[in-house]
């Protein structure tokens, strides 16, 4: 694949770079937001909810990374991470607004 | 990446596996060795004798020693010997450390049966592999971050590997030996699938172990700036009363062991910590040995040191923490007896082999294309050198580390550091060697060198210490004997690997080049 890569167009290389960045940083953002959302909404005491949120977050990260390389285009990789990020941020913000945390 | 889902996953598997493969190989191999860290330390400090265990007697000896040598100290720590670590370690702190600092401790190791001081040769022992496994010899916290990032990559590589490998159970029963690339791939799949539960457990648990470092968002969201409050809630610590400044003798601590054991339904004490010994407000905190699968952080019972009255015990951990503790306990395997410990070791080796075979496959597949011209592009040569140094070189460096322990003079200043330096110098030399020799020759020479050094370990041990194999076998010290025998077996295995390489090299050169090419094409379709 590497030999092929040498002849691959620049656009392909940029797309791969974009997907890698989306997976590493976008994926982390989704995972971190998912852990916060879980912590806010789980009916557990504070410390337990935090631990549970952190434990589960790595599964979210995994799925996010897989998504970034499975989707059709590099743009959809970013969209597919930013939409859940906005939703998760809204839900956890709502929990805070409702006074859960 | 325009192809289907499985092709995309195969692509991801190939590339994350390559980029992090060398680091993961070192992490897996040193982690596997760390399952025997106490045993390795025992071999590297054989002066500390292994005695029949008697916790009460050892504790009495430790208390007598500390009363004689550290009566005015503010704090004592006593680590009791166990089946794996024979030393009775006592430490004391003259004056309490400033808040937030650990303070300086004096440390002595005692003979668990006689109570006299024993001086083991200065060495990091098995602790070196344990530390390297997650700190990678880097300053805090960078090594931990890098190791945890590598763990996340491993997690991605495992799951994408499972997705790629569609006929997971059918293929498991297909092993085609002596078929070159195909055999490597079959081997990679076999060790991957065979111990898949272990791989998943070990990888996910390593993420959980450092989760509050790498994924702190929810702590910050819930606790804000008061992060310490989170740790206080997760790891409840018992409060210790202030010094009363009234001199009162400490009661014998040995009976406390039985009382603590009652609290833990039979669990054992690993460590005792005595605050303000000799004061009316002395307290003794007994910490439990990690002998359960579910690791319980800071499980302790506190007693009044003068009256022996129980002051409190940490509560049972709630469910979420128990899950985290189970991951921790499973990863560390402190609870494992000898059989299970060997099983852990073998699973770890299988994981190491899975990573190693993966790296070999990556290169082998691409090398075939350049077999005819005989000229290798720079990137393939780079991968080849890194493969050799990270695998054969690391194994050789480990043998050098053990030999340095026996060969460096005991009086050498900074001896423990020099053992570690010897390890890294040997590893560095393996890079130089791999750069200067053709690939296959470098493999053969480094494997042969490793074989020679590992078989030399029991010999050098017999020549430089009285704990030779004959003596340890007749005394029944299976830790020391087992270490020598394992080193010897490793040497034999490496010699076999070098011999196989040598033979393969001589057959490849007479092979029909056309057949090679035809195979390369089928592989490209089959293995990608």
Image (cartoon, rainbow, N blue to C red):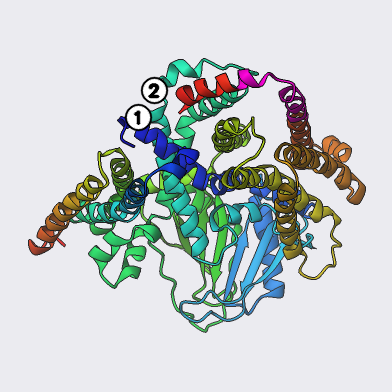
The answer to whether residue A72 shows anywhere in this view is: yes
Q: Quadrant of the C terminus of chain B?
A: top left
Q: Which residue is mark 1?
A: B6
Residues under numbered marks 2 and 1 in contact, where contact means CB atoms less than 8 Å apart: yes
Query: Percent x, y for residue B340?
Result: 58, 33
Let me know if residue B509 is in the magenta part: yes
Query: Percent x, y for residue B212?
Result: 37, 59
Q: Quadrant of residue B439?
A: top right
C-alpha span from label 2 to label 1: 9 Å
Q: Around disc 2, counting alpha carbons within 10 Å, would you say few (fewer than 14), some (14 to 19), or many (20 or more)? A: few
Give the residue furthest to the left.
A98
Q: Nearer the viewer, mark 2 or mark 1?
A: 1
- Nearer to us in this view, A22 or B188: A22
Chain designation of label 1: B
Q: Tag 2's secondary structure?
A: loop
Chain designation of label 2: B
Magenta stretch, residue numbers: B499-516
Q: Tag 1's secondary structure?
A: helix
Q: Earlier in the sequence, mark 2 or mark 1?
A: 1
Left or right of A35, for residue B325: right
Q: Which residue is mark 2?
A: B166
Left or right of B228, for residue B205: right
Left or right of B69, for residue A85: left
């Amino acid at each position: 694949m590497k030999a092929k890569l040498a002849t691959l167009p620049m656009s392909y290389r940029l797309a791969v770079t974009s997907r890698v960045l989306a997976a590493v940083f976008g994926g982390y953002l989704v995972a971190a937001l998912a852990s916060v959302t879980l912590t806010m909404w789980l009916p557990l005491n504070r410390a337990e909810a935090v631990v549970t949120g952190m434990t589960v977050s790595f599964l979210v990260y995994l799925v996010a990374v897989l998504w970034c390389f499975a989707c059709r285009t590099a743009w959809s990789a970013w969209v597919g991470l930013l939409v859940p990020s906005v939703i998760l941020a809204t839900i956890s913000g709502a929990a805070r607004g409702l006074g859960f945390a | 990446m325009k192809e289907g889902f499985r092709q995309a996953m195969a692509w991801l598997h190939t590339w994350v596996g390559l980029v992090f493969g060398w680091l993961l190989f070192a992490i897996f191999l040193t982690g596997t060795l760390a399952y025997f860290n106490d045993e390795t330390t025992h071999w590297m400090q054989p002066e500390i004798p292994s005695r029949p265990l008697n916790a009460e007697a050892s504790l009495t000896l430790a208390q007598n020693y500390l009363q004689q040598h550290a009566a005015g100290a503010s704090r004592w720590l006593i680590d009791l010997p166990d089946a794996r670590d024979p030393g009775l370690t006592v430490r004391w702190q003259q004056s309490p450390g400033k808040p937030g600092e650990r303070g300086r401790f004096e440390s002595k190791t005692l003979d668990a049966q006689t109570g006299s001081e024993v001086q083991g040769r200065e060495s990091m022992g098995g602790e070196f592999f344990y530390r390297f496994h997650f700190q990678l010899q880097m300053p805090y916290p960078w090594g931990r971050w890098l190791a945890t990032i590598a763990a996340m990559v491993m997690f991605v590589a495992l799951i994408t590997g499972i997705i790629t490998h569609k006929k997971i159970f059918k293929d498991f029963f297909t092993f085609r030996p002596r078929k070159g690339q195909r055999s490597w791939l079959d081997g990679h799949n076999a060790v991957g699938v065979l111990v898949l539960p272990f791989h998943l457990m070990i990888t996910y648990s390593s993420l959980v172990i450092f989760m509050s470092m790498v994924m702190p968002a929810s702590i910050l969201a819930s606790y804000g700036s008061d992060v310490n409050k989170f740790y206080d809630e997760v790891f409840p610590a018992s409060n210790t009363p202030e010094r009363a400044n009234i001199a009162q003798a400490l009661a014998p601590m040995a009976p406390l062991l039985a009382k603590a054991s009652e609290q833990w339904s039979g669990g054992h004490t690993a460590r005792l910590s005595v605050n303000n010994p000799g004061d009316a407000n002395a307290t003794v905190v007994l910490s439990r040995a990690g002998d359960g699968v579910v690791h319980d952080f800071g499980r302790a019972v506190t007693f009044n040191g003068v009256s022996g009255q129980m002051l409190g015990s940490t509560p049972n951990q709630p469910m979420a923490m128990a899950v985290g503790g189970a991951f921790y306990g499973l990863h560390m395997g402190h609870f494992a007896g000898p059989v299970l410990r060997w099983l852990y070791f073998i699973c770890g080796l299988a994981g190491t082999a899975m990573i190693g075979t993966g790296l070999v496959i990556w290169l082998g597949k691409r090398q075939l294309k350049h077999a005819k011209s005989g000229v290798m592009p720079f990137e393939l040569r780079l991968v080849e050198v890194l493969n050799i140094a990270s695998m054969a070189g690391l194994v050789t460096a480990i043998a050098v580390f053990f030999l340095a322990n026996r060969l460096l003079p005991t009086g050498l200043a900074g001896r423990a550091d020099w053992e570690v330096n010897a390890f890294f110098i040997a590893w560095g030399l393996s890079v130089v060697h791999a750069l200067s020799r053709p690939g296959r020759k470098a493999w053969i020479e480094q494997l042969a060198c490793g074989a020679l050094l590992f078989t030399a370990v029991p010999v050098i041990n017999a020549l430089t210490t009285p704990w030779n194999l004959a003596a340890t076998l007749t005394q029944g010290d299976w830790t020391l004997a087992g270490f020598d025998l394992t080193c010897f077996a490793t040497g034999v295995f490496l010699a076999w690997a070098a011999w196989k390489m040598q033979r393969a090299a001589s057959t490849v050169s007479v092979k029909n080049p056309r057949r090679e090419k035809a195979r390369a094409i089928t592989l490209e379709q089959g293995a990608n």
